Image: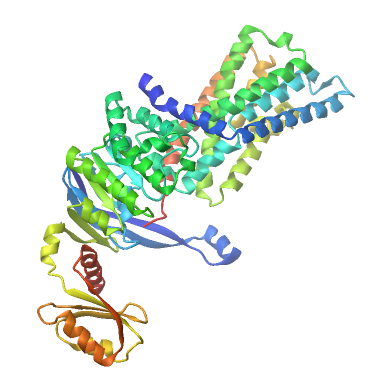
Amino acid sequence: MKSFIKRYSGFTRCAIQEEMAYKKGFFSHAVSQLIGILLSIFLWRILFQEQSTIQGYDWDQMILYALIVAMLNATLSFGTEMQLSEKIRDGSVASDLVKPIDFQHMSLFTAIGQSAVEGGLAILLIAAVAVLVTDLSSYLKPLSLLLFAVSLLLAFLLKFCLAYLGGMLSFYTSNGYGVVYLRQVITDVFSGAMLPLSFYPLWFQKLSTVLPFQASVYLPTQIFLGRISGREAVHTLLLQVVWVVILWFLAKILFRFAVRKVTIQGG
Amino acid sequence: MITARALTKEFKIPRKQPGLKGAIRHLIHGTYDCKRAVDGVDFSIEQGEAVAYIGPNGAGKSTTIKMLTGILRPTSGEIRIHGVDPQKERIKNAKNIGVVFGQRTQLWWDIPVEESFSLLKNIYQVPDEVYSENLRLFQEIFGLSEFMGHSARKLSLGQRMRADLAAALLHNPSTVFLDEPTIGLDIGTKEAMRELIQKINRERGVTIILTSHDLRDVEDICRRIIVIDHGKVVCDQEIRALVAQYPMDRGLQITLSAKSPGLLEALRAKEGITHAAMEDTHTLSVEFDPNLHTAFSLVKEIDQSAVILDFKLKEPSIERMIEQIYRSGEGAK
């Protein structure tokens, strides 16, 4: 285990350094995140002028929901997935395959590094916004925070698996961008990243409960907001674990097939 | 020891009709051409050998290397590298091999070369003493320190290839695969690359498998040559034995002021002329048996029917030998 960590942690470190290498990209990323957050706050403010709750969410809950979504979106961005699909499509995956490393583990540790930079900054920004515009005091209970932290971690792993699978699928079509974009839209809708799932029609809610996407965004928000608690929260975490395991191994199998088709170019 | 037995790789190449209609038709009912890139290749290489694996473009060299390194799965046949099947146990195999692809880098683009190296040190779990001893050797031959702090993105091709070769050797692999390692490099860098490869082969007994279109690489580094053409091995021999076996015809390259009709036919009809062809509109290439003709007599003879601007004697070289092997392969088809 120790040597495993030693072998793969280098990828995290290098990913952090690579992210930092693009200072301008780094800051423009932060600015665009902040603008997105402010926009959604203004939007909800307009809607809350007429009423004090919307579909059972009061102002604080709604804003915190939007902020957690922004935080999760900031970790593991579009880039991680594009990079993956590009690597397979242009054959540069060959350089990784001649090394004694597991490609999926390597990708995960790289994603951790990328997310640490993007997500780290986002968490600071978002925490500052949360303190400024909402009353957090009732949500900062140690037990629910602990459950939330575990749920976030699982959500991250799940997001990684989804992105990794997306990268893999885009290899089968010759249009990486299209598949990645489509997956992003589907994920945004079904995960609750656009709106809380309880806002949608009942049939849609039922459908989303049997899909993995809600476990990557919606469930962690519900734990933080205290809408899921106690035994139900533990069940939720278990559900997340199950999805992570299923998708992790599905990705392993898919990779084995994808890699057979790889690097056809060049005599 | 490396063995390949009846190694075959077929590719399915999608055949698409042009335009949107063709693309849609392909989506629904795809048709494929089957290309056999590697076709029943057999060889066996002992530890410590230096083998050139050469052939014309598209002969199946890189495909073979990719199968040996565990990247591609053979359609059929068997590979063993120190007893390991590189497909089934890719990671185990990868620990013992080093790979350089001349056409792509293994370094991380945006971080200093130094950091790439220390990442590799972790991946391969290279002991500190080995790591620093190797760095010292690379420094001595390659002068790496001048760009160790630069990111790969900023390196010149020569620097990048030196760093790439060093990166592939950091963990003391027992076998090194070099797929066109000197492509596009200047003479000085090529020399340095060859020196390091020779050194690890002779002093450390590292097995070298090299593909290159630069036959100087082959002459300097390798003792054995495997020639592959159309996916098949057409020659597998010690270079020394090959030289002895091909008592080389001498060659002449003659620049004519104008194309001379009937000249080629007249030459070809002669006994002892093994090859006569126009390389381009003005350059005539002739090969002859030195027992029957001399260069002087031939030039004198050609001079009677054409105006000679210049001529060059081509000495027997490995390059011409390979040329002959390719040519005889074409003839057999």
Give the image quarter of residue B299: bottom left
Give A84 or A187, whichever is nearer the viewer: A84
Q: Residue A223: image x %, image y %?
A: 65, 17
Q: Can residue B74 be seen in this view?
A: no
* Residue sticking out furthest to the front: B309
Q: Is residue A107 left or right of residue A57?
A: left
Which quadrant would the N terminus of chain B be assigned to in this image? top left
Residue found at x 66% / y 33%? A29
Q: Position of residue B61 (x, y in %)?
A: 31, 56
In this view, B264 is above or below A139: below
Please tell me whether residue B172 is drawn above or below residue B45 in the rendered image: above
> In the displayed structure, does residue B173 sit left or right of residue A53?
left
The quarter of the image holding the C terminus of chain B is: bottom left
The mark tally for this picture is 0
- At x 86% / y 27%, what residue is drawn? A46
**Residue A94 horizontal/vertical position (percent):** 40, 44
Q: In which quarter of the image is residue A160?
A: top right
Give how far across and how far down residue B72 sits, in percent.
Answer: 35, 48
Q: Which residue lies furthest to the right in this view?
A: A50
Q: Nearer the viewer, residue B8 or B191?
A: B191
Identify the colour scheme used: rainbow
Residue extending farthest top: A142
Rendered residue at 58%/66% (across/down): B19
Identify which residue, A258 or A77, lies in the foreground.
A77
Is A109 placed above or below B5 here? above
**Could one spot residue B313 in this view of the protein?**
yes
